[in-house]
Image (spheres, rainbow, N blue to C red):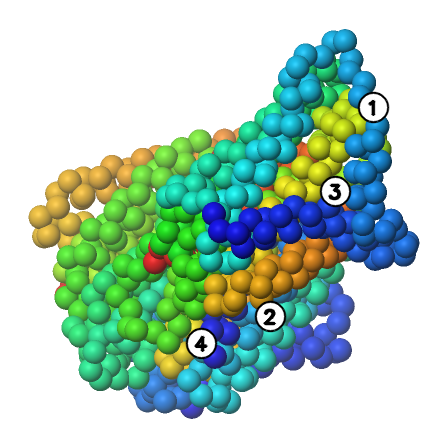
Amino acid sequence: MRDAAQIVLLLVVLSDLAILGTSRLSSCIRGLAAQGFLLGLLPVLIAPQLSVHAVSLALGTVIVKAVALPWFLSWAIREAAVRREIEPIVGFIASQLLGALAVALAFAIASRLPLPALQQPLLVPVSLATLIIGFIVLTTRRKALVQVVGYLILENGIYLFGLTQTESVPFLLELGVLLDIFVGVFIMGIVVFHINREFDSLDATRLTELSD
Amino acid sequence: MTAEALIALGLLGITAPAVPGIAVKTKSFLTGRRGPPVLQLYADLAKLIRKGRVYSRTTTPIFRAGPVIALASLIVAALFLPLDGREAPARFAGDLVAFAGLLALARFALVLAGLDTGSSFEGLGASREVTIASFAEPTMFLCFVALVLAAGDLSLSGMFGAPLAAAWPHAGASLSLVGVSLFVLLLAENSRVPVDDPATHLELTMIHEVIVLDHGGPDLALILYGGALKLTLFGVLVVSVLVPRAGLSGLAALALLFAGLGVVALAVGVVESVMARVRLVRVPQLLVGAAALALVATILQLR
Amino acid sequence: MRLLALCAIPLATALVVFAAPAFRGRRVPVALLFVVACAHLALVTSLWVVPPLPTLGGWLAADPLGLTVLTLTSVLFVVTAIYIVGYLRHEAPRSGRVFAGGLLAFLAAASVVALAHHLAMLWVGMEATTLSVAPLVFLRRDRRSLEATWKYLVVSSVGIALALLGTFFLASAQGQGGGDMGRPLLLPDLIAHARELHPAWLRAAFLFLLVGFGTKMGLAPMHTWKPDTYGEAPSLVSGLMSGALTSCAFLGVARVTEVVAAAGLGSFAQPVLIAFGLLSLAVAATFVIGQRDVKRLLAYSSVEHMGLLVLGLGLGGVGAYGSMLHLVNNGLAKGWMFLVAGNIALATGAATAGNRGLIRTLPASATLLVLGLFAVTGSPPFGMFVSEFTILRAAFDGGHPWIAATILMALAVIFVGMAALVLGMVLGEPPAPTGRDPGAVAVRESRWLVAGPVALAAIVLMLGFYIPGPLRDVLTRAAMALGGTGP
């Protein structure tokens, strides 16, 4: 189980870098769905023994992160004419290098954190890496939809970190967290839809009317 | 320089033209055609060697030396690879730099020969080729760094031979990443889709094929054979990383190597039929992605 | 039982409003809103009289801090429900379901935040308050509100995500502490075992929770969503947000400060809190000058007051009591000011500097606006003066005369900036009537629209002279839980 979890965590890092490097909006959403599926596999692979808590968490995660959210995001951009991201503020090549640096930074920080000998030593570095990469996508991309994808990657990173604390957060609250994220992205998707309608593009850098 | 090693090298040299043939056949098969026979390149080489030579009056001896130097460098580079999974015919600490340098020399010779013609098409191809190389070389070195960290040995025999096999149990994840990165490098350095389409006939879209546009006859035979050999060498790199063969006997290791080369050729064919060629400005991005993978593999080794 | 009812009743009503076919169409179920608001206030009052026991295994409990925020939210909600009666006579939201459902969901979520003693539950409630208000910000469906909603959602969501990470860090602190740490993430257990919590994780948790919940509060430099959101949302929504939502967010910061104070890491936390507070004051003072929109002005005033709240926490001693008192005063005063701004916007189209001579056209609202100016900037005899004075006292007591001087300077600049806009709007000659029926303007000041702000103004005025015994008692106990002292 340990090796399987390790492979899944590495695939999560790969999905992060893949989303960072792609310019097509549909590829971003598909990468996110793949990541959600990988995240759903983890609770069952990490738990020392199969419990109802782990299985239900896995199921809930897969349903929300791998199915519902990507489907909903695709719905939100169905009327969008442009399906490609414009050159981001940092540039695609620089973003990928930043992503690799983020992974390095995450491993460096994780090695200094006082943590017990976890069953799965890759969990904390990968969670920090996903967090930082989510932040990079959120702040450097211009299309509103890709910013939402970045936010979801950020949340995935935090979810990964939360997996190290499975005993302290009861299942009901994990469900609450998932539900909150779902509703949040639901509302964001509706706003993205309206942005596309109103401004005829998904370019969030056009939202500059309000300022001081 | 054992006899077995030289025999292995000779076998590799003989079977090299079959590798692109397998790739083209796979691609044809997947796109619904019958395609040329797998051994087509042998027939082409035989035909080309029998032809006469024609040289333009605007060229210099560089034009004639180019293909020869290219093929010679590739053969010398092949001496450094441990084909039986354990030991290479030639080795010294740091020969990975020599390997990379010889590959670069081969490319340089061809580019120079192309520029020597004074034609604008070759110049266009030359500049593109060198630009792609400037992204591919750092990626290759990053892969080598990851392998050096895994195997703890600074020579190619160590990096691709027995010490690497010993490193697989605990460095498996990072070695898989290096394998993927090397495969992307294979596609880039050998002008395969998605970097360059070898089947295109539009000179403005070519990268490698246009550099050698003015070569003909035996020179073209040398170039075509050199191209097949380069593809085979990169295939050996990929197979050596992903399939450690140190524990097997000489014959079994060789057989596994050739089987692996066949699989790599198959994979190239599949990739060529599934993907389209990317825009030229996106090629650096692709190579940086491969570099990022190699970087992550290195980081995984460092912790 | 009552605690559960406080959360469940608004939530159930919200679900009914969203789902039931009877509520389709544009009509807002005002009576329902009013009934739920009164029921909520009645239950909260009963909590003051008969203190409740913790329920749900200790997850929900009413301690002094939570009770203060809960009461504030409830009072503001009742006043808003009264205001809505008058508001709906002049403007109708495009979807009555979303409007009413969002408000009710907000009430439920705020109750959860106030009563939650399990910190993950507090986070869930906090995120729910963010999400329930978002559709309300977007009510007008035009370009500007769309932009405001987008910025609000993105910044708040990132902040809340960081707060979640901070919550997980807190759980790590408990896990790494060694020995029996009690039930995970439960506040009483955290405080009881505070000294054994792992200090590095606890410090990291404090920083992330401060930044995360600070984003919801609108502390600088995470305040960027505030002016746009308060400016574009309907005034009554802005009033609820600046009065109740920011107080709930402050509660999140206060909870982690409780734990940090109990763990003896006050010397680490206080400078950070003071830094954020001073930065917020500076930002508010800078942007208040030259403002042309009353709602945006009030947003920056909100940033200022959040800065003061956090300063009070950071200065310690009697400053904690000052912060608690300021929480109450600020919530009520902001609600008052936003409702008045709403009246002006309803009457003249927009509460901006283009208006002049409001004292003649809207006498009640203009008077309330001017009185509110004095209240919000901390002039006597209003309640804010007492609370700001207490915080200043804490600065002097703690040996920080420079901080006190900075606060005074910022307050002075803010007063001048706000007065410039408000007095400019209220005094002067009103613009010539543009053919609109002059009688119509006076009609818009119906008693429904004015009653709410008047009631809030009366309370704030009273708090300037006299703080009722039970309130003083609750505020003192809250201050002591935060590591400070009473008045």
Q: Nearer the viewer, residue C313 or B246?
A: B246
Report the residue at 69% width, 48% height from top.
Answer: B14
Q: What is the x, y in percent for residue C264?
A: 14, 66
Q: Position of residue A149 (x, y in %)?
A: 59, 56
Q: CA distance from mark 3 to mark 1?
A: 35 Å
> Which chain does tag 1 point to?
B
Q: Secondary structure at mark 3?
A: loop
- Residue C8 location (% of width, % of height): 51, 82
- For marks 1 and 2, give the CA distance: 61 Å
Q: Amino acid at mark 4?
A: Arg
Asked whether disc 2 touches disc 3, contact meaning CB atoms under 8 Å apart, the reply is no
Image side of residue C11 versus residue C92, left or right: left
The answer as to whether the residues below labels 3 and 4 share one chain is: no
**Left or right: C74 with respect to C264?**
right
Give the foreground label among 3 and 1.
Answer: 1
Q: Are marks 3 and 1 on the same chain?
A: yes
User: Marks 2 and 4: which is nearer the front?
Assistant: 4
- For marks 3 and 1 on the same chain, the one whose residue lies earlier in the sequence: 1
Q: Which residue is mark 2?
A: A37
In which quadrant of the rendered view does residue C93 lie?
Answer: bottom right
Distance from the alpha carbon under mark 2 to that under mark 3: 29 Å
Q: Which mark is residue B52?
A: 1
Q: Amino acid at mark 1?
A: Gly
Subunit under mark 4: A
Q: Are marks 2 and 4 on the same chain?
A: yes
